[in-house]
Amino acid sequence: MVQAATMNVELRNRAGKGAARATRRAGRVPAVIYGNKLDPIMISLDPIELMLQIRGPGFFSRVYELDAGGNKNRVLPRDLQLDPVTDQPIHVDFMRFSSKTRLKVEVAVVFENEEGCPGLRVGGVLNVVRHAIELLCSPDSIPESLVVDLSGLEVGDSVHISSIKLPDDVELTIKDRDFTVATIAAPTINIETEDEEGEEGEEGEAGTEGEEGAEGKAEENDSGD
């Protein structure tokens, strides 16, 4: 079972827009716990603690255990509303789940052992095609990340989803193709050839000679007058 994170939770007595505004005026963020055929529970969260969780990786794929009035609820964040001006959280929905619940979640891809990648050592570039992969699994089986080992990859090599080992009880939502996750691309180098440099030099010299000839003719005409 996944180790659940925790947050400070306080119960709210009333639901509705007016009650939510009152909670925000009191310096907390209104939220609700729903699902699993149980009555919803109105709660509030500490805004600073919530922002730390939101800014961390994988907020919507992280299991939380929220203690609401002595009742512990294992939940997943399912919706987050932000203020359009301040970009601060103003409401969060948490969904309860059971052992039978299966969800679609996006899990971040993490790349390791860049120092052991020959393609990167010679100047190649890691081109990430998919920063996250959509999975189907129970909330307790959600992996923190999917790890790609770059060891031994050369310029031109590709990493496909088939090379990433998935945990037990975890499926891909895309099953009809072995899609690309990342590639080691060749470095882009701009090279000027000697022929191009030579042509530029000749044109420059020809231009100089033409200018000097014109000045000489002008001086001859002046002396003739």
Image: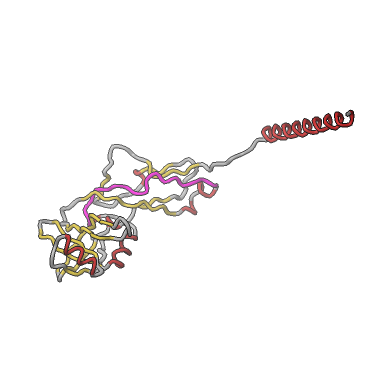
Residue 219, image quadrant: top right
Left or right: where does residue 118 sit relative to residue 182? Answer: right
Assign the C terminus to one quadrant of the image.
Answer: top right
- Residue 109: percent from left, percent from top: 36, 51
- Residue 137: percent from left, percent from top: 23, 51
Please tell me which residue is depicted at 47% across the width and 48% down the height of the picture.
152
Q: Is residue 130 magenta?
A: yes
- The stretch of residues the image draws in magenta is 123-139
Residue 100, compared with residue 73, is above or below; it is: above
Assign the N terminus to one quadrant of the image.
Answer: bottom left
Left or right: where does residue 182 sit relative to residue 27? Answer: right
Question: Which is more toward the observer, 174 or 106?
Answer: 106
- Residue 171: percent from left, percent from top: 26, 47
Please tell me which residue is depicted at 86% across the width and 31% down the height of the picture.
222
Question: Which is more toward the observer, 91 or 121?
Answer: 91
Residue 60, image quadrant: bottom left
Question: Which is more toward the observer, 116 or 10?
Answer: 10
Residue 38, image quadrant: bottom left
